[in-house]
């Protein structure tokens, strides 16, 4: 089984930066998409960014130019570098694994809280 554990959330001032990490425990191989999603209180969960097993990336319009998704195969980890943070970026950020081949499996982490406030 695979488990995802996020870290790196916290309180930051507007304009500041944070780096979120998602550690994957368990072997991941083949074809998959990993991503970061966020959910603010009273709002629907929304996609932030994804990265594929082939290193293709995709970003939501509201984070383009500010956030960068990356992964480290050797460490079995995924990251989200968040710069120029805004109060509206405050949310619980969760990492997701959508494993397509050879397994069909979707896993979520428990989430990490990001609060952008002065």
Image (cartoon, rainbow, N blue to C red):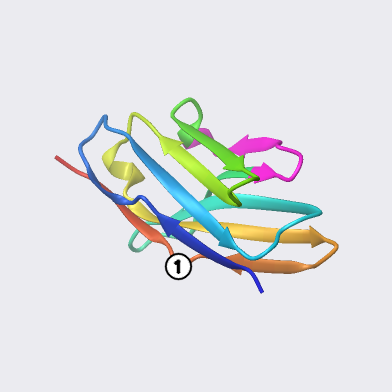
Residue at 61%, 52% in the rendered image:
76
Q: Looking at the picture, how far across and down is residue 18, in whole percent?
A: 34, 39
Q: Looking at the picture, how far across and down is residue 36, in whole percent?
A: 53, 50
**Of residues 23 and 50, which is closer to you in this image?**
23
Position of 86 with respect to 96 (left or right) is left
- Going by the picture, which residue comes out furthest to the front? 74
Q: Looking at the picture, how far across and down is residue 110, in whole percent?
A: 45, 67
> Quadrant location of the N terminus?
bottom right
Label 1 sits on a secondary structure element that is loop
Position of 61 with respect to 30 (left or right) is left
Location of residue 111 by image quarter: bottom left
Q: Looking at the picture, how far across and down is residue 34, in whole percent?
A: 64, 51
**What residue range appears in magenta?**
51-62
Residue at 56%, 50% in the rendered image:
77
**Of residues 111 and 3, which is closer to you in this image?**
3
Q: Using a 10 Å C-alpha cutoff, classify the residue at mark 1 as few (fewer than 14 neighbours), some (14 to 19) or many (20 or more).
A: some
Position of 113 with respect to 33 (left or right) is left
- Going by the picture, which residue comes out furthest to the top? 65
| Residue for badge 1 | 110
Can you say whether 66 is above or below 12 in the image?
above
Residue at 52%, 56% in the rendered image:
23
Position of 35 with respect to 92 (left or right) is right
- Going by the picture, which residue comes out furthest to the bottom? 1
Location of residue 89 by image quarter: top left
- Going by the picture, which residue comes out furthest to the left? 118
Location of residue 30 by image quarter: bottom right
Residue 56 colored magenta?
yes
> Quadrant location of the C terminus?
top left
**How many numbered markers are drawn?**
1
Residue 7 colored magenta?
no
Can you say whether 38 is above or below 116 in the image?
below
């Amino acid at each position: 089984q695979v488990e995802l554990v996020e870290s790196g959330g916290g309180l930051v001032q507007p304009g500041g930066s944070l780096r979120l990490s998602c550690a994957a425990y368990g072997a991941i191989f083949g074809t998959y998409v990993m991503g970061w999603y966020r959910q603010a209180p009273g709002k629907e969960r929304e996609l932030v960014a994804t990265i594929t097993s082939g290193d293709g990336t995709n970003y939501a319009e509201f984070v383009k130019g500010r956030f960068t998704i990356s992964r480290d195969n050797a460490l079995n980890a995924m990251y989200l570098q968040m710069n120029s943070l805004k109060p509206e970026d405050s949310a619980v950020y969760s990492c997701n694994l959508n494993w397509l081949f050879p397994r069909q499996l979707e896993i979520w982490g428990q989430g990490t809280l990001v609060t952008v406030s002065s």
